[in-house]
Image (tube, rainbow, N blue to C red):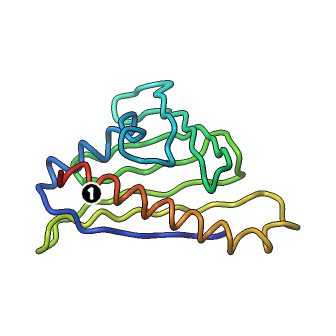
Amino acid sequence: MPFVETDIIIKGDINEIYPIVKDMESYPKFMDSVKSIKVIERGENSTLTQWKTELKGKPFNWVEKDVFYDEDYKITYELTSGDLKKFEGQWTLTENPEGVKVHLTVDFEFGVPMIASLLNPIAKLIIKQNLDSMLTGIKGEVEK
């Protein structure tokens, strides 16, 4: 199962950056690949969100459960339905001498073993580029 991770340093206060990361519905405003995010269900410390994205011109859609650990500045997410068999990971924010380090991970699986060996390397690259783009979008939103 491919695992992708990336991070970025954002200048600012962790208490101002975390709410922007947590407000997933606003992502389409500053992330080109994210077409829409709709909250289907809202719990005390979680949401069920429907994502519509585009990766390299192809639609990629799913529903995920997001769990918020506000005191730790952490968000975990896990696929409940969608285009992959497995899609899960986490956002973690930590204070850093240069600002706030935002770390994003994803662990995914196609669910079709015959094509996985062919597609995994390409998918890892595309997902890494998309994660980097998401973090750059958040950085731009915070530092503007």
- Residue 101 position, x and y percent, is 25, 67
Q: Is 57 above or below relative to 82?
A: below
| Label 1 secondary element | helix
Q: Is residue 69 left or right of residue 121?
A: left
Q: Which quadrant is home to the N terminus?
A: bottom right
- Counting the numbered discs, the total is 1
Q: Quadrant of residue 115?
A: bottom right
Q: Is residue 128 left or right of residue 83?
A: left
Instruction: Name the residue nearer the viewer: 95 or 136.
Output: 136
Q: Label 1 is placed on what type of residue?
A: Lys
Nearest the eye: 107 or 50: 50
Tell me where residue 111 appears, x and y as whole percent.
78, 57
| Residue positioned most to the right | 114
Q: Residue at x 49, y 57 (%)?
A: 89
Residue in view at x 21 percent, y 49 percent:
71
What residue do we see at 68% from left, 49% from top? 58
Q: Which residue is mark 1?
A: 139
Residue 143 left/right relative to 109: left
Relative height, residue 57 to residue 118 (above, below): above
Characterize the local packing of mark 1: few (<14), some (14-19) or many (20 or more) Cα atoms within 10 angstroms.
many
Percent x, y of residue 15:
14, 49
